[in-house]
Amino acid sequence: MRVLILCEYDSHGIRLGSRSAIAFANTVAEQTRGSVECLLLGHSLVTVAQDAAAYAPVLVADHPALANPVADRYAKVIADVVTQRGFDLVVAAATTFAKDILPRASGLLGGAMASEVIGHEFRDGRLCFRRPLFAGSVVATVAVLGNPQIVTVRPSAYAPASARAERSVITNVAIAEASLPKKTEFEALQSKLSDRPDVTEARIVVSGGRAIKNSEDFERLVGGLADKLHAATGSSRALVDAGITPNAFQVGQTGKVVAPELYIALGISGAVQHLAGMKNSKTIVAINSDPDAPIFEVADYGLVGDVYELVPQWIAKLNEAM
Ligand SMILES: Cc1cc2nc3c(=O)[nH]c(=O)nc-3n(C[C@H](O)[C@H](O)[C@H](O)COP(=O)(O)OP(=O)(O)OC[C@H]3O[C@@H](n4cnc5c(N)ncnc54)[C@H](O)[C@@H]3O)c2cc1C
């Protein structure tokens, strides 16, 4: 199969999640004697294209009209690239970026899509995908009928591809600005700069739940512990709904799906919708004042107590140890 990977990047280069999508694409290409190419969309992409070339040949759609990720424009460019160059499979990491763009591209292409893929296998020569249903209660194996196939892959399911010493070829894709959709205009980007890692990419995640009463307490307890552990901060939806944490922090069925080495749940009950986003973490630590809280059923280490008492003690112990 000819596989195209829609890559996300930041100022450091290709994002970790996209490197997992590359790893998935590499195995599919190996198993089908196919090939893999990365696609970058944006503007001023010289540096990131060089970084991407350490993983696979790169197609670069570099144009001022693509400077911001406006989904209908990006979807059009992806659909054109797939049609003109004959790709069979389009892959991206299952992130909000891809969730916005790839279904549109799939619609334009008349393709068949599977989202949130966590594994794959071949059955009678046909590529099948494993994906969770009902908040992760069951895992379905599905074959998508149609061409091209479009897939988003959960980064936690595939170890990120490693950079190679040699660089692959970089090819520019011509963009006809007049052909790009203009119904959506980019207005502004509001983002809060943080030194903490992204919740989907961190080795350790410290998450707070409804036990945390306000933003100041969240920053002091959840943020304070996260900083000691070089961790990302996350939260349950209860805190997002209360306006205490931003949407980007939400872990769960309707938030981010994470599988870090260590997940620390502070005052989170463990509702099934929250568990859907973190139960595959390697080690789970929970602090909750209710000994019967469902979070203790998935926790490797549980502490019954008040987060307002225990977390400052934990931070103090870490300070002593440093
Ligand atoms: C369609 C749908 C999608 C959803 N998607 C998500 C999602 O993506 N992510 C998500 O998180 N939720 C999601 N939810 C909401 C979910 O059902 C729960 O309501 C939510 O996860 C509860 O958050 P919580 O554990 O912080 O709050 P609660 O369930 O209220 O739990 C708070 C916990 O804190 C403990 N506690 C209280 N005070 C203290 C203290 N001082 N010290 C220690 N412990 C204390 C309590 O014992 C309790 O266990 C979704 C719901 C629906 C219907």
Image (cartoon, rainbow, N blue to C red):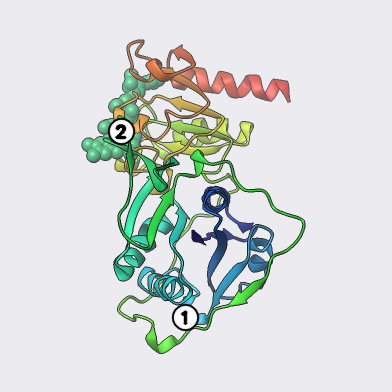
Q: Residue at x 39, y 72 (%)?
A: 79
Rendered view: 116 above or below 311: below
Q: Residue at x 44, y 60 (%)?
A: 90
The answer to whether residue 86 is left or right of residue 321 is left
Tag 2's secondary structure?
helix
Decide which of 66, 312 is in the foreground and name it: 66
Q: Which mark identifies residue 204?
A: none
Q: Spot the residue most to the bottom.
A: 178
Rendered view: 213 above or below 244: above
Decide which of 52, 274 is in the foreground and name it: 52
Type of the residue with mark 2? Gln
Query: Mark 1 — residue?
Result: 65
Query: Mark 2 — residue?
Result: 273
Q: Spot the residue most to the right.
A: 165
Give x and y (percent) for residue 60. Answer: 57, 73
Does the beta carbon at disc 2 come under 8 Å from ligand 1?
yes
Point out the quarter of the image occupied by ligand 1. Answer: top left
